[in-house]
Amino acid sequence: GVHYQNDKTDIRIAQLDLQWQPGALVEGDLQIASLTIVGLHILRAPSPAAANTLPDVRLPIAVHIDRAIVRDFTLGEPGKDPSVTLTEASLSNAAFEKDRLSLAQLAVIAPRYRIDVTGNLAPQRAYPMDIAVRWSADGGEYGAFAGRGRINGDLRQLKIQHQLTAPVPAELRGTIDNPLTKLGWQGELSWPAIDLHALHGPWPALTLAGTVRGSGTLNRMHTEGELHSGYQGMHADHRFAVDYDKGMVKIRRLTAALRESGASHGHDGGCSD
């Protein structure tokens, strides 16, 4: 095994196997054919809050990795349960050259979730990226969750497209501005009719579809949307607009219209809590 320790970090590796091509270094290329690590456990002392900037990463040589795999990984603080526990993480056909990282496949498997990532990233300045993600998770009594999405742009503005595929379909589109400094966001979430009782037994036999749009920052938010519900032969359309500002919620609009009977009832106005 391997053990490294300093005043802030303790790293233990139970097993390490590396196959590489030393001759390629002459041409400025680190070529790793296979890297296997089993039992990687890292303990780190608490550190001050991270800065709001990311470092420029530039390597003096190119790096190519055909296959790398880590099994049994934990990360945490001394005397506490691990904050991260992974069953396995694997990397296939990865390269870092001309200041850009490209991933053919990165798979992260934990006891209750899995994430697969492909794409490329330039870890300098604004960190331009184009990344595709697939994921799945164990939702316990709510069943399996799964989705796929894409993130592209840079740290000035990231565009996000995401589709939830299980247990119900839904689509999210939006942007995130300046996530490390002055965070701002806007987006739209939509989904077709969902039977809540089929999704979770104790819930009522209510169907719900809708579209919600929103924008804001960490302290302020505006959302509005339309919901369409059905229950025991009755159908209703709902519209709402809600603002949130530093702990205060203001309902600007809340209406409902019963479509079956043609009668409607609602409330327009504002209130705050």
Image (cartoon, grey):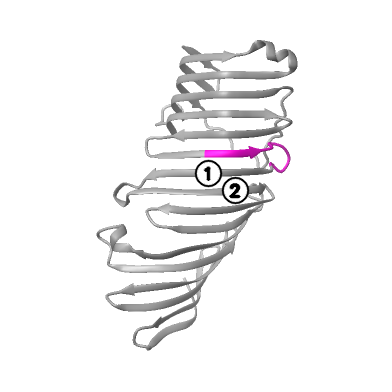
Is 74 left or right of 205, judged from the image as shown?
right
Above or below: residue 149 compared with residue 234:
above
Magenta region: 117-127
Badges 1 and 2: C-beta atoms under 8 Å apart?
yes
Is 106 left or right of 168, judged from the image as shown?
right
Mark 2 sits on what residue? 151
Which picture quadrant has residue 184?
A: bottom right
Mark 1–mark 2 Cα distance, whole angstroms, equals 8 Å
Whether the magenta-drawn stretch holds residue 119 is answered as yes
Whether the magenta-drawn stretch holds residue 68 is answered as no
Mark 1 sits on what residue? 133
Is residue 76 something that shows in the picture? Answer: no
- Name the spot of residue 183 as percent of width and height, x first: 63, 54
Q: Which residue is drawn at the image coordinates 38% and 68% (left, top)?
A: 208
**Between 179 and 67, the one nearer to me in the picture:** 67
Q: Which residue is drawn at the image coordinates 71% and 25% (left, top)?
A: 59
